[in-house]
Amino acid sequence: MDWREVMTLAQGAPNPPPRRVAKSEEEWRASLTPDQYQVTRLAGTERAFSSQMCSLFQPGRYACSCCGTELFDSASKFESGTGWPSFGAPVAGGVIGYVADNSHGMVRVEVTCNVCDAHLGHVFPDGPEPTGLRFCINALSLEKIVT
């Protein structure tokens, strides 16, 4: 995956998820902490450097905190200095959704869990090789899975 493919997907190219998880807003509120709900269901952003997950580099995978779908592997995680966990690539095609985001006077690409539509963060074209991508993800939207 590269930036050109990200932009194609953000403009609406087909990107089928491996499965779908749907819950009512009441069910999401009951299954998430208030902070997780604010970030994942209301597209909030946690404070930079507010999570120890930024400096966590042990082997394993990172799953969506809403539905448990595996999204990122620690092998693609890197220190970006931004204050949010950053990854170079998702674990598989179809697990991440891409949405053009022109809010706040910026042109960005929002990334969501393609299985349950949880807001994860944004992707930028300034990451390390081999992808050149930086998936800048709210720690509250992730759950570390030790593999």
Image (spheres, rainbow, N blue to C red):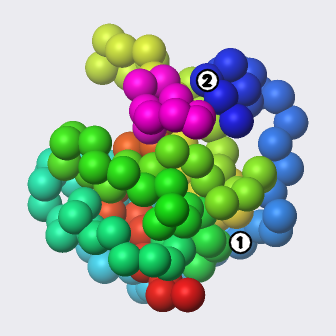
Look at the magenta stretch and give its main secondary structure.
loop
Residue 16 lies, in percent from the top left, at: 85, 50
**Amino acid residing under circle 2:** Trp
**Amino acid residing under circle 1:** Val
116 falls in the magenta region: no
Residue 40 lies, in percent from the top left, at: 43, 59
Q: Label 2: state its secondary structure.
A: helix
Residue 96 - label: none
Span shown in magenta = 124-134
Q: In this orientation, does residue 10 appear?
A: no
> Which is nearer the eye, 73 or 108?
73
Mark 1–mark 2 Cα distance, whole angstroms, equals 27 Å
Question: Left or right: where does residue 86 sit relative to residue 26?
Answer: left
Residue at 70% from the left image edge and 36% from the top image edge: 1
Residue at 81% from the left image edge and 42% from the top image edge: 15
**Badge 1 is on which residue?**
21
**Badge 2 is on which residue?**
3
> Which is nearer the eye, 48 or 34?
48
Residue at 13% from the left image edge and 54% from the top image edge: 49
